[in-house]
Amino acid sequence: MFNEANASIRSATQILEFIVVSKQSVARMRERLGMALRAGERWAIRAPLTFSFAAVLVLLAVTWGLFRPSYDTNDDVFISMIAAGQGFCPAPDEHLIFTNVLVGHALKRLYTAWPQVPWYGLYLLTIHYFAQVTLLFLAITSGRRLAEQAGDNAESFPRLRLGLYLANFAIVELLMLNNMQFTTTAFLAAQTGVVLLWLAWQRRAGDATANVNRRLAAAVAFLLIAALVRPESLAMTLLAGSPLAISISWRQWRGAIMPCGSAVAIAVGLIVLAATIDRAAYDNDSRWSGFFSYNALRVKFNDYRWTRFTPGTAHAFLDSGWSKNDHDMIANWFFDDAELYREDRLRSVLDSYPWKSDRLSEDYFWQTYRGLGRNRSVWATLLALPFFVAAIDRRTAGRRTVVLCGLVSVVMVVALTLNTKALPLRVYFPLLSFPLCVAVLMSDLRAGGDSMLAWLKLRESPRVAPVVMLLLVVGLVMAVHHQACRSVRVQKDRRAMANLIAELRPDGHTLIVCWEAAMPFELLSPLDNLQSWSKMPLVNLTWTQRTVWQDDIKRRFKIDDLARAMADREDVLLVATPAHRALFANYAWEHFGVELDFVERSRAGEKVAIGRFQRIAGDASLSRNNDAIVH
């Protein structure tokens, strides 16, 4: 008994010693972490630009190492294939369709000189890097001189701004990096240019002697970059940022109109010049004649999905010689039939029925806004917004401006949904998250102590502060967890796609036809140099149909009719889902009079299979005359 009691006492003593040592270790860690943070804050105050370059580099490296980003859509992979001359593009080309040819020329030269380097992904990542460096620099420095002139202690202000910047990075930039896309990259560049111009205007209005030339030059550069990457993103950002101009009083306009107005004029001139060069590159090339006019029509069938084949709308298609399956083919992105899907037929179908207004049903709005409302990234933004608003001094007009930016963004999302289609994440998320960026730069310069919660309680109601802080934490956890889960799925699917490509054993003599999104190109890393696709001739049944490159690939394989080649030739493999294969089997029966069976060669998951069609019945002499089409 005595020995057992001694053993128990020794065990208890060891546990107490462990607890004491642990507390001391934790205290030392907290002390060291606090010292490191204070050193970082002093560095940020002393050399804000150098600090911004280093801090953003670390953030991007950590993000890339932990989350392994991929593309958001297959569009970026196709654009990179055009610039690199891989896949469906036989040689590097500057015609990037959605992005200005000036960017295309630069990428073409880089890929021609150093084809092993992933220039397209690096180009997008570079824009992200410099935009984030600029935003962090502005978060640290904007308003600092005015605060010093007012007698406030500027030594403590970066703490709040740095915290808000990191929260904005975790909620917004993490998603944009993890879902790399040229549209969101253009949004980021445009937002950076807008806030640079706005802050330069404010600084000049507050101090007529202030030198804002560097900020204005940077603003012009970012606005031009946004226009080169995706001009639509620039236009939407300018509208979303319009409340920033409204927040400036007439007195401030008079003080800053000359330097800032000159910068705006220069930006407009450069953007118009770049757009003129881009348009001339297509207009002066006979190979692109009619592409954009045709493209403007076909998007309403498959991208916007305005049309539907129903008993009430059947006449619109039958008058143009289309069956229901013919409509479903183009609605599902097959329009590589020069006769059936002629431009005049598309225009006739679109003009014969009020598709745009008729599609605006209760079900359309329900499906559209339910998807938006269920997006966890949007919820993370909404949950964090109250904290960002609370960080703005209520004595200023900042809160009202941020709220107005949010309202304008919501109105734009609704208007675009009414006018075009259900918006994808890459469009509505940058718009809805823009108020967070504005709030970071409008936040109060005074941190008010070590505890953020204590500072909020001083500025807000003691009951409101804990709720706002809790919402921020929930939003941060939701945003980071959502992207972590996506990265896990991407890694798993990326390995499956790599195995699929290995099974294909591309030799350059077999044509791979990829239908819509059946081949998950978007899983590729932005730092992939596309060398694994160098011996894989592709035809993509997406927006790349009826283009110069796809025609070159078909000529190389001596294909005049892609549909017949898919039905007859053994050197043409199809990557498609069961729905796609069923559509094509019906198409072949209606137009060729043959019955096809799909012979599977490889599989990726439950839906996607690679294989080829073979004939099992039918009369090949059946005419393709419209009178013979089975409706």
Image (cartoon, helix red, strand yellow):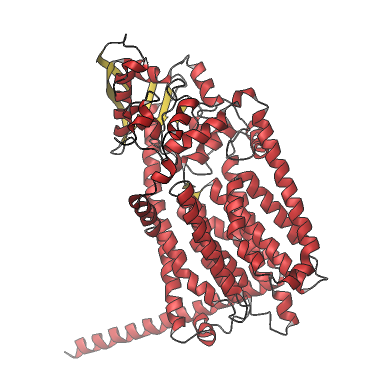
Residue 405 lies, with reference to residue 271, above or below; the image says below
Give coordinates of residue 581: x percent, y percent: 31, 28
Is 35 left or right of 570, judged from the image as shown? right
Give coordinates of residue 75: x percent, y percent: 50, 39
Residue 514 lies, with reference to residue 434, above or below; the image says above
Of residue 162 and residue 321, the one placed in the foreground of this image is 321
- Extreme residue in the top direction: 621
The image quadrant that residue 601 belongs to is top left
Is 254 left or right of 142, judged from the image as shown? right
Give coordinates of residue 236: x percent, y percent: 58, 53
Q: How many marks?
A: 0
Which residue appears at 67% of the width and 79% of the height?
155
- Extreme residue in the right direction: 209
Give the quadrant of the C terminus.
Answer: top left
Which residue appears at 36% of the width and 18% of the height?
626
Of residue 417 and residue 559, the one placed in the foreground of this image is 417
- Extreme residue in the left direction: 1
Give coordinates of residue 436: x percent, y percent: 54, 66
Give the quadrant of the N terminus.
Answer: bottom left
- Extreme residue in the bottom direction: 2
The image quadrant that residue 207 belongs to is bottom right
Q: Would you say residue 68 is visible in this rendering?
A: no
Is 606 left or right of 152, judged from the image as shown? left
Q: Would you say residue 612 is visible in this rendering?
A: yes
